[in-house]
Each structure stands twice: as structure tokens, then as C-alpha cells.
Image (cartoon, rainbow, N blue to C red):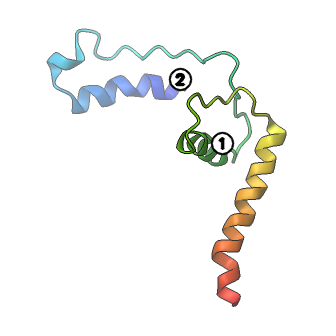
Amino acid sequence: MEPVAAMLPYLTKKVCPADAVGEHQLVPFHVERVAGLYENRRSGDCGPVAIKFLEMHSTGNEQPTMASLTDDLVDIFRKQYGMEIYKDWVVPLYL
């Protein structure tokens, strides 16, 4: 997140009026990680983790939380998404 936090002030300056940005125009944003949430440290898992969070929001879960996710659960729904894509996109090609 550090590169993004450092880049955001420059993007803000580029697209926002000067009076909206304020006097600290190029100071990097302060970012703190929320404690107790699942932290994706493996390459390739960000898409499935983001989709799972969107699913939790879209199904009416009033307080979706990523705290209960583990790497093992992420592995399971990566496989599940892979099988669903195969079933919906590849299988019909052979029918």
C-alpha cells in the first residue's frame, strides 16, 4: 500500500482543483491496516478474495467480515471458482 499512498496525492493534484486539495498537496496518505482481518500474502489470490468479499456483500450479509478467512479457505474457493468457470465456459464448447 505504501506506493499507492505515495502516488495518490499526485493523482489528486492532477485531477482536483487546487483549493480542494489543500496546502499539503504532495504529502503521502497515511495508511493503517485494520487489525484482525485476513491478509492476502500470496500471489494470485487477490481476485478470488475480492470476489468472495463482493459475494458476502451481495447476499445481504449486513456485516461481512474477512476475519474468518484463512489460506485454506481461499484455496477452496479458488478451486470452486475455477470449476464454475470451466463448467460455464469450456464444457459448452464440447456440447
Dot 2 amino acid type: Glu
Residue 81, image quadrant = bottom right
Quadrant of the drawing holding the C terminus: bottom right
SS for dot 1: helix
Residue 4 is left or right of residue 15, and the answer is: right
Dot 1 amino acid type: Val
The mark lying in front, picked from 1 and 2, is 1
The one nearer the camera, 33 or 73, is: 73
Q: Which residue is mark 1?
A: 49
Give the residue drawn at x 47%, y 13%. Answer: 30
Mark 2 crowdedness (10 Å alpha carbons): few <14, some 14-19, many ≥20 = few
From the viewer's perspective, is residue 30 above or below residue 90? above
Determine whether label 1 and label 2 are within 8 Å by CB. no
Mark sitting on residue 2: 2
Q: Position of residue 19 (x, y in %)?
A: 15, 16
Mark sitting on residue 62: none
Mark 1 to mark 2 CA distance (whole Å): 21 Å
Q: Position of residue 84 (x, y in %)?
A: 70, 65
